[in-house]
Amino acid sequence: MISPRVSLFARAFFTCCTGLAGLFCLAGAAQAQETADTVDVLITGGQVYDGTGAPARTAAIGLRGDRIRFVGAVPRGVVARERIDARGLIVAPGFIDPHTHAYEGLPRLNATARQNASSLMQGVTTVVLGADGRGPIDVRIALDSAERAGLGTNTYALVGFGTVRGRVLGASSAPATPAQVTAMRALIVKGMEEGAYGVGSGLFYAPQSYSTTDEVLAVVSAARPFGGVYDTHQRDESSYTIGLFASVQESIRIGCESGLTTNIGHIKALGVDVWGKADSVLSIMGAARKRGCVVVADQYPWTASGTGLSAALLPRWVQAGGRDSLLARTNDGATRTRILTEMEENLRRRGGDSTLLLINGGVGSAPYIGKTLRDVSRSSGRSAVDAALGLIERGLDMGVASFNMTESDIETFMRDPFVMTSSDGSSGHPRLYGTFPRKIRRYVLDKPVITMARMVEASSGQVARTYGLTDRGALRPGAYADVIVFDPRTIRDEATYTEPTKLATGMRFVFVNGKAAVRDGSLTRALAGRALRKR
């Protein structure tokens, strides 16, 4: 019996005219046959997790161009330009990191930074641009220029509430006037029109922290006609100002009343005052969903957060007006005493001077990197907070790893079906290089807190659905060919707090839009990432 495929081929040939024209027709028919049955990459034998949360199944995956051609049995007659034997390996959608600083500084980053090796070697194929309210206002320019320069991973943008407020009010702690609110709303609309997927905020950080809830809501609600996500580093993850519970409620109110999905970035219970409160936070979020609000969160699997020395310890009122104003306050005797008293309380919240590890900084910071604040205090003969303030006054506002979370809270948040995976990756902290492999190794394989199916879903399909990243985060025909193949026996994070830039291991292949960015465990030179725009 002649197969339908052969019959089609024969019919195409015999309907052509004879002679030279017939030869051209035969060539065209053969090309059509190759196009219909050829894939660029055929992956067989792997355990496939499709990103929906479904259990693994053994299936073949064919990639052609920038799309997935098929998932399942290999169609008869398929010819593959490259075959990958994935027996003993796991095949999954490329991970999507919804809260990272990997691409912060686009489009000015150099070629090495734009390759984004730290993400690719974790299996991350798409990252956000604009976490913590630092997203661009000129979204079109940022995305277009970055794409022209070349990107190792896909990226999507959030317009930054912090960037917008800084453009209109600078570092002022004054409340926004109605005219200023109008100006900020216009900038939000501009960013959304140019393809942003939502609005990012960082209300913990000055000068965003000076905004009232009503001001933030008035500005962010300008994104309502476009839809999308309100992503926030919430105002208080501890007991600094309004407290963790009130802060979660504020975040939900802003997202819900603005008509956006609320995503609480890198959700945590930070510091001794709120340890053990993860269940209560999740209850607040669950109650809001019952009221009709759309509320999710993302999380990284580390007990240390990463921030700046001033952000960790300085009261926000001290930072109002910028550096000159800060120095004027610290040089006034009575004001300095008040500052140090409040810094002492902030240090207590974080668990004391041994919990702050100095991890990066600019010129002059080298002697302090790798030391705790306790080390610096003892070597200088000054109290911990006085030593910290002295560094800040000298312009050495270094990054810190702040060990202020508990494993039990991390695991509680991780088990929740509305909590996704993110890295919050930033320079000097190992999470930039190791978050996703760490979660697989530590919380799926070594001490199972969640299943592999849940890990993959929380790191791919769920993120794509939350942000509306069309045809990403899924292994299905027609989806973009962001596909990873990794070895569950060898996958692990290698970065540490003293060696934070060691690449993760275990990723065998990483395809970004059908191009191999990692092949046989090694980076290629491919820059196949795209700048994604919300339509």
Image: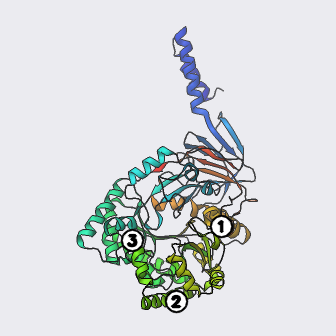
Residue with the mark numbered 2: 345
Q: Residue at x 39, y 54 (%)?
A: 139
Q: Is residue 62 left or right of residue 472?
A: right
Residue 306, quarter of picture? bottom right
The front one of 76 and 513 is 513
What is the spatial separation of the Cα atoms under label 3 and label 1, in whole angstroms? 28 Å
Q: Tag 2, which secondary structure?
A: helix
How many numbered dots are placed on residues in this image? 3
Q: Identify the mark at residue 255; answer none if there is no mark.
A: 3
Q: Tag 1, which secondary structure?
A: helix
Residue extending furthest toward the left: 179
Q: Point out the tag, 3 or 1, that comes first from the N-terminus.
A: 3
Q: Position of residue 92 (x, y in %)?
A: 63, 54
Would you place residue 335 above or below residue 327 in this image? Answer: below
Q: Is residue 116 left or right of residue 231?
A: right
Q: Residue at x 52, y 16 (%)?
A: 15
Q: Position of residue 132 (x, y in %)?
A: 46, 68
**CA neighbours of label 1 inside 10 A, class few (<14), some (14 to 19), many (20+):** many
Q: Could you tell me if the residues under marks 1 and 2 are in contact, i.e. CB atoms within 8 Å?
A: no
Q: Point out the tag, 1 or 2, that comes first from the N-terminus.
A: 2
Q: Point out the tag, 2 or 3, that comes first from the N-terminus.
A: 3
Would you place residue 81 above or below residue 432 in this image? Answer: above
Q: Residue at x 42, y 74 (%)?
A: 323
Mark 2 residue type: Glu
